[in-house]
Amino acid sequence: MKKLFVSALLALFLVSSAFANPTKVGHTVLRSFSTEFNDASDVTWTATADYVKANFLFEDQRMEAFYTPTGEKIGVSRGISIDELPLKAKRTFAKKYEGYTVKQSILFEGVEENAYFIDAENDSEKVIVKVYDNGTLSVYKKTKK
């Protein structure tokens, strides 16, 4: 169930931007965030009933951190180049999606799992696939152009 929740959170990250109004963030979430990302800058917050998201700059990298409303870390995501994918993950993607152009790749380091999400397209469709270090791949989302 938590994997489904984490996947849903990442979909929100991939598909939408944060157009939130100023967000009130709880003390425990702020404490959890500052413990790990004390030197973060340009922090913006988005909150829902299920999670709180910080979008920020840390060590010259744009990142997002997800927390439960009670301050427990769900995971952290950051954009990566396709070259940073593990070899098995790259090979599996290249074999199954030959002819697709990669638009974005993201590393999600979660409390329960780590996964890579690849946003790619060809002339007729767009896909977001989830791939693991071992090369296991699943289609997260597929749409026709």
Image: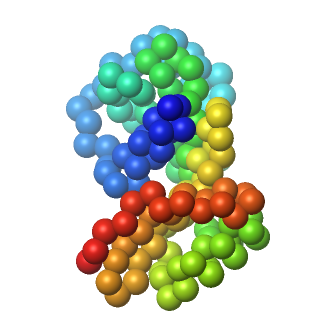
Res. 56 in view: no
Name the residue rendered at 66%, 60% in the picture.
136
Res. 127 in view: yes
The percent position of residue 64, horizontal first and vertical second, equals 50, 42
Closer-to-camera residue (59/4): 4
- Say above or below: 35 vs 57: above
Name the residue rendered at 33%, 22% in the picture.
49
The percent position of residue 97, horizontal first and vertical second, equals 53, 79
Closer-to-camera residue (37/138): 138
Name the residue rendered at 26%, 77% in the picture.
145
The percent position of residue 106, horizontal first and vertical second, equals 55, 57
Report how many numbered discs are placed on residues in the image: 0
- Colouring used for the render: rainbow
The quarter of the displayed image where residue 143 is located: bottom left
Name the residue rendered at 31%, 51% in the picture.
16
The quarter of the displayed image where residue 35 is located: top right
The percent position of residue 41, horizontal first and vertical second, equals 52, 38
Closer-to-camera residue (32/1): 1
Left or right: 11 in relation to 93: left
Left or right: 114 in relation to 46: right
